[in-house]
Amino acid sequence: MKARIWSVLVMLTSCAAAQPTQGAGAPAQATPVHTALSNVLEANVKAEWEAFKNKDKNAYADLLAEDFVAVEDDGEGMRNKARASAEIDHSVVNSYQLFGMSVLPLNDNAALVTYELTMLFPPKAQVRFKRVLVSELWLKRDGKWKMRYYQETHVR
């Protein structure tokens, strides 16, 4: 599994490095295609967290690729699609806040989405808030964008 993670990271790094760059200090220009892609993937990310909040396992699973892999900050290791979807049954996310979402197209069928997420849990929960930085790899398969990889890192 570690080799698979490293291969994903190498692919992301090489794809990002191959992206054309602007002059020093020049802002990146959003193209209509990039804007449309950003809108689709931002909606998918919101649907992902709405599914968790509403305990809608089917809606969540529908966003995931069949070969989906997730690594969360809980130290429990990698999860596949079935295990990640099953976690919704135990979810206690009351609400959430997404911040700083960024979509980096890697090619016509792949994009890296990053954002900060703050989750709010019930008043009687042992932990009330959790902040994580999230990276997601989305792939276009059979005309639909599916999440292939999810990685979160705890923020203090």
Image: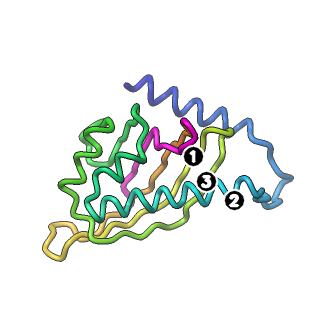
Q: Which mark is residue 136?
A: none
Q: Which quadrant of the figure contains the N terminus?
A: top left
Q: Which mark is residue 103?
A: 3
Q: Which quadrant of the figure contains the C terminus?
A: bottom left
Q: Residue at 61% x, 53% y: name it.
A: 103
Q: Point out residue 97 in the picture as x, y percentages from the top left corner.
A: 42, 70
Packing grade of label 1 (10 A; few <14, some 14-19, many >=20) is some
Q: Nearer the viewer, mark 2 or mark 1?
A: 2
Q: Is residue 154 magenta?
A: yes
Query: Are circles 2 and 1 on residues that touch, CB within 8 Å?
Result: no
Q: Nearer the viewer, mark 2 or mark 3?
A: 2
Dot 3 amino acid type: Val
Dot 2 amino acid type: Thr
Q: Which mark is residue 112?
A: 1
First in residue order: circle 1 vs circle 3: 3
Q: Point out residue 11 in the picture as x, y percentages from the top left corner.
A: 59, 30
113 over 12 or under it: above or below: below
Which residues make up the magenta segment?
A: 142-156
